[in-house]
Image (cartoon, rainbow, N blue to C red):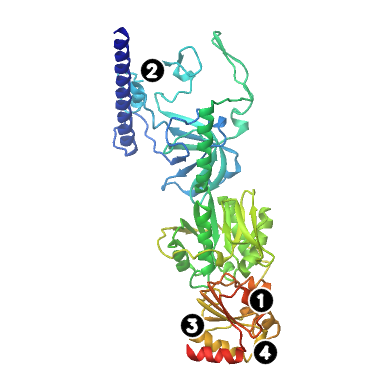
Amino acid sequence: MKQLHACQDALEKKESARMEERVGRTAVEKELRAVLEAKLDVSAGYYVQPIATVQSCFAQCLGTPRQGLLAPLTRGRVLCHRNISPDTLDGLSDFSHVWITFVFHANTNGKNARAHDGLLRRPSSKPSHTFRAKISPPMLKRRMGIFATRTPHRPNPIGITLAKIEQVDMAAKSIWVSGLDLVEGTPVLDLKPYVPMLAVDVRSQMQTTKMQGKMNLLVFDNVHVKYTVEADNSLCTTLRSFSRASSRFASTLVVAEHNGEALTGGTLSAITAASKIGGDITVLVSGSNTANIAKEAAAVQGVKSVLHADAAQFDHAIAEELSSLVVTIQKGSNFSHIVAPSSNISKNFFPRVGAALDVAPFTDVLTVVDENTFQRPLYAGNAIATVTSSDSVKLLTVRPTGFEKAAVTGGSGVVSAAPAAPAANLTRFVSEETSSSERPDLTAARVVVSGGRGLKSGENFALLNTLADKLKGAVGASRAAVDAGFVPNELQIGQTGKVVAPELYIAVGISGAIQHLAGMKDSKTIVAINKDAEAPIFQVADYGLVEDLFKALPELTEKI
């Protein structure tokens, strides 16, 4: 019977403690909400507003490390509020660590949950302390004054922590950090750089310290923490989960290409590739009189922000000028990835960006495995290489045929001016000669009709033009036809020409060398017409016709 009464008393005490904790949590949440909404009388003291909010891998206090430096793998982001200018972060990336001053917004310690009432009351002749003067810190067997401890339950619920800076993104007004010991949603009051010369180096070795001559606290430089099996499994699961979700802390700059009126299809494919990397997507639009194109980019699904470089020096995508702009932006925003569509433009300026940043670019990326791993073709597309980068910033050109085009609506990006870049003044644009055609662009056409050396002359390409016009498609050619002078170089499809992936590709008089297949084998449906039944083109064709093209082509055109 005594044991039953003892058990009943224990249950009642636990229930009382639970209710007390619940009341305290409710009270502190109401008061914090009132403080954040600035609806309280604070004439008796100072009122501060949070300037940022923490996005953390820790959803609640339970399981959050007491000291971030003991858990260097933890990751998080400090996201500045809308009223904070991105210029406030200028120069912070030059430092290794940052001091974060924050509010202990999740205190739920029962009666002591109201420890911050002192901030909200007028002074009186008989001040009433609503916090305990002494507490028992973990691992110590004595009570100490709260100002001699690091307890979160203080007269003013304010804390400070040191975190390592992983990346500063001025465009997104955010700082990615590691070694974080804050929970999701923590309000941030201030940020300061860590300067070893002006602050105590918390990473240095700490020596044995006497406290009031009564006890010794030993803290060692090399701390080895041993977990139970259950705790170790739980930690590994958490870290794996956060590793999979860490892509949300990535950030990608997409260098847009346009024709002066609209974004190219390759740029939309590059945005899709960036979305597979994860994280925030910023699009760079350069050139004078391109405000409408910047607005178009902001409306693309998945785009968070647009940097608009409205200057004549970028009008013709001169490699020296464009690379100077990209490098300037990268130094200010520290993106984790820089992406551009594979094109003659990116082939010209991207290597310069890589050289300036001391990074090796990956070209013609077909697949994004994760934020560090990608797949790209080798040996004219006969082999696919999986490559991994450990560089701080990954430079990628993506093959437009490898990714679907991003939706041009659904986005709500913010357009802002790009930082000014120094003019290179090494190359001067003289003139440009382009051929105009009513047919769709070769790389964006739904149907492509291509001819090879089997057409025998440039005049015979008129047969292809007639068929292409009926199908509302574009005309292409193999390198053999271009080298023979049948058609201009801009129509060349293949490894050293353009890469296409239309819904319908008709190859006429093309043998099917691997260099040509590399530029069209991703087409949805391939039709081959050739009088040589052993031509390699038939190995990749969905439909093949062994016939003289001069007989088959007029008949096919007539029946359409």
Give the label, 3 or 2, closer to the camera. Answer: 3
Give the residue pinned by disc 1: 536
- Give the Cα separation between the discs numbered 2 and 1: 85 Å
Q: Are marks 2 and 1 in contact (CB under 8 Å)?
A: no
Q: In this rendered view, identify the residue nearer to me: 19 or 50.
A: 19
Q: Which mark is residue 472?
A: 3
Please tell me which of labels 1 and 4 falls first in the chain. Answer: 4
Q: Which mark is residue 500?
A: none
The type of residue carrying mark 4 is: Lys
Give the residue pinned by disc 2: 132
The type of residue carrying mark 1 is: Pro
Give the residue pinned by disc 4: 456
Percent from the top left, x then y, of residue 160? 49, 31
Quadrant of the rendering where the N terminus is positioned: top left
Q: Would residue 407 be found to the left or right of residue 211 on screen?
A: left
Percent from the top left, x then y, of residue 288? 52, 69
Please tell me which of labels 3 and 1 falls first in the chain. Answer: 3
Q: In this rendered view, identify the residue nearer to me: 489 or 209.
A: 489
Please tell me which of labels 3 and 2 falls first in the chain. Answer: 2
